[in-house]
Amino acid sequence: MAKIKNTSAKKNTQVIVKREKLRRTNSHQFLLNDKEEKALNRYLEKYRIANKSKFIRETLMLRVLRQFEEDHPTLF
């Protein structure tokens, strides 16, 4: 008789662990001048971006990761 493994419990545990690692607990604050704020709000409105925080976070991290790729040493 073959044993049936219950993989759903293991899978659920892995999902919970991954979510805990990705939880955002660090806060960063920065200031914008009036022109920067106006430009940002205009951009968000024009492109119908509802989540300002998510947009700023993704835009910032995209720039950081691109810079890391550019600075990565290559053989040639």
Image (cartoon, rainbow, N blue to C red):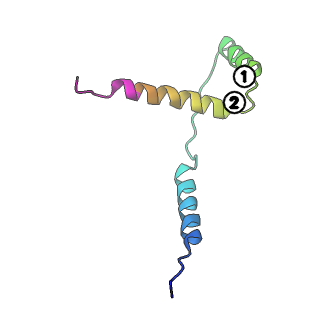
Residue 1 badge: none
Residue 23 on image: x %, y %:
58, 50
Magenta extent: 68-76
Give neighbour class at mark 2: few <14, some 14-19, many 20+ (Cα, 10 Å): few
Residue 46 on image: x %, y %:
75, 18
Q: Is residue 46 left or right of residue 64?
A: right
Figure check: 22 above or below 35? below
Furthest residue in direction left, as rendered: 75
The reply to whether discs 2 and 1 touch (Cβ–Cβ < 8 Å) is yes
Front-lying residue, 16 or 76: 76
Residue drawn at x 51%, y 83% as measured from the top left: 3
Residue drawn at x 28%, y 28% as measured from the top left: 73
Figure check: 10 above or below 26? below
Quarter that holds the C terminus = top left
Residue 52 badge: 2
Furthest residue in direction front, as rendered: 1
Figure quadrant of residue 29 = top right
Front-lying residue, 26 or 17: 17
Comes first in the chain, label 2 or label 1:
1
Q: CA distance from mark 2 to mark 1?
A: 7 Å
Residue 48 on image: x %, y %:
76, 25
Check disc 1 and give the amino acid type.
Leu
Q: Is residue 7 magenta?
A: no
Residue 44 badge: 1
Check disc 2 and give the amino acid type.
Lys
Give neighbour class at mark 1: few <14, some 14-19, many 20+ (Cα, 10 Å): some
Q: Is residue 71 magenta?
A: yes
Residue drawn at x 58%, y 32% as measured from the top left: 58
Front-lying residue, 41 or 30: 41
